[in-house]
Amino acid sequence: MSGRRGQALGVRLFMGAIGLVLAAPLVVIAGVSVNASRTLYFPPQGFSLTWYGEILRDAGWSGALANSLSVALLSASLAVSIALPLTWFLWRWRVRWAGLLYTLGVAPFVLPPVISALGFLAFWATLGLYGDYLTVVFSHAIFFVTLPVVTLSIGFQSIDRQLVEAATVAGATPAQVLRSVVLPLLRPYIVCGFAFAFVLSLNEYIVAYMVAGFTVETLPIKIFNALRYGYTPVMAAIAVAFVAVALLVFGAIGRFGDLPRLLGALGADEEKSP
Amino acid sequence: MSAARTPGARQHLPLLYPVGMLTVFFVVPFAIMLAVSFFQRVQGGFYEPVATLANYERFFSLFFANVLGFSLGLSALAAAICVGLGFPFTYFLTRLARRRQVAWLVFLLSVLSLSEVIVGFAWSTLLSRSAGVSNLLVALGLLGEAESWSPGFAALLLGMCYLAFPYTVLLLYPTLARLDRELVEAATTLGASPLRAFVTVVLGVARNAILSGLILAFVFTLGIYLLPQLLGRPEHWTLSVMITDQAVFQSNLPFGAAMAIFLMLVSLALIALTLLLGRGRDRSAA
């Protein structure tokens, strides 16, 4: 009995230690972000929220914030718009080259990002669009299309085909089935795919830097550029804001969606058999 | 029933948009990069389309061979640490109650989504002299005076593991979550100690997942670009740093492309290996 209790304690210590290492850098940046003075010091000396206000007051930081948010919104929407018909087709029809289609949707994110980034750079440079705002949007949409492709594939697999057949037998046209049966069931997975793409696009550095780093400053690029000239507490405040956004978005998915299932804890086949 | 039908030409129309987008913005860029890697660099300009192997030859010089060797070694070490810690961690995670599991997953996803810039900045702060852990050790009387631990090899390795760890856990998660608990219980009932049951049963069943985890962490850390600059010294710069340096700062896109193609071949070979092993597992399971 005491052996088992000791073991449980050991497991807790192990998981706690990993949690501590994962959280430690976040705690420190949260600490330095409320420093009253401009210097990098932890534990914080005094308490001030000036640096959070500075994000909006300073034209450079607020511009970067606007760039990042708009790029993330547009590219995540574009990624979902590409993933939806692709995954729908793979669910609706059985084709021999389904594997190839799926690989095409998954490949951009599986390769080391530096490779995709260089491919984008070569492409936009050849077209003469290098440095344009839209190049970041399109590159991010393609780079992150994998996330909605994966969540939507899981979503389609979870749809009970008998529902679709019942609707068809009752006289619904394929368009009506799609609108009134398939899409409502799919909505949580669409939201998840969008959220994943959105949060990762906000944080993405290398692709954005390669295709338009010198003209379109997103927040990660702005932070890196600022780091070269020394430290300012604004970057700590931004980092905290990023962590908060991620916790909020994924927390919402965990609260309202089925996170373990989305991450593959249950196979589609297991789900259906009661 | 509906899925079994084969579509006609008209039914393929919805594919036009997604496949078109992926072809134009993903396949074509790749083809261009491949072509450029055989082109010749033009001083002050971009490149000219003359077929040459010079970019690949240059890559096999001693300097770049050293960089490649260092990159591969660093990634292999990081992958081993990530899976070595990530495997038991994920196993215990899947054993937790659902609410706590979800909380952990939210936390892991949040860490995973963090930008390399932010992770590098946060760790360099944590390891710095003025705001770092060494202050804590001084306060506890374990250390004489505060020290700076970044930049350095250990700092870089730590940062890389930090970035790859959440990915590794999420890759191992499905396999371990579906693992039949009764298997472990059966082994303990038959007299195996919990540790022995874990090693023989769990490690045996999840062998392929462990291999995929190693490969994922390896390929992923191979692509990390900012951390070597934020947490390492110039001698710790990896192939990814060199690729970007050549493409952006030396304006030598052909050479950068050649290195990227080489890096991609290494990654693809490893991914193909995982897929092959995965297929073997499916067959043995059926």
Image (spheres, rainbow, N blue to C red):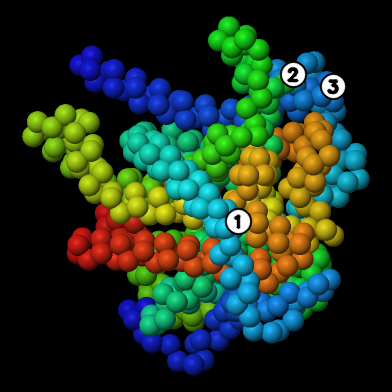
Residue type indicated by callout 3: Ser
What residue did someone put label 2 on? A44
Q: Quick one: SS at disc 1? A: helix
Q: Quick check: do tags 1 and 3 share a chain? A: no
Q: Position of residue B2 (x, y in %)?
A: 37, 80
| Amino acid at the residue labelled 1 | Phe
Q: Nearer the viewer, mark 1 or mark 3?
A: 1
At x 47%, y 43%, the residue is B78
Q: Position of residue B158 (x, y in %)?
A: 54, 36
Q: Is residue B1 left or right of residue A261?
A: left
Circle 1 chain: B
Q: Secondary structure at mark 2?
A: loop
State which quadrant residue B176 falls in.
top left
Residue, x 51% and y 40% (percent of image)? B161
Q: Which residue is mark 3?
A: A37
Q: Which residue is mark 1?
A: B63
Badge 3: how crowded within 10 Å, few (<14), some, or many (20+)?
some
Task: Kindly give the residue lying farthest to the top in the view shown.
Answer: B141
The answer for how far apart the CA atoms under marks 1 and 2 are is 44 Å
Distance between the alpha carbons at the discs numbered 2 and 3: 9 Å
Residue A15: image tag: none
Image-quadrant location for residue B68: bottom right
Q: Is the same chain shared between marks 2 and 3? A: yes
Closer to the camera in the image, A183 or B199: B199
- Amino acid under disc 2: Pro
Vertical arrangement, residue A17 with respect to residue A235, above or below: above
> Where, quadrant-wise, is the C terminus of chain A in this rendering?
bottom left
Camera-nearest residue between B43 and A215: B43
Residue at image point 72% right, 21% down: B130
Q: Earlier in the sequence, mark 2 or mark 3?
A: 3
Picture quarter with the N terminus of chain A: top left
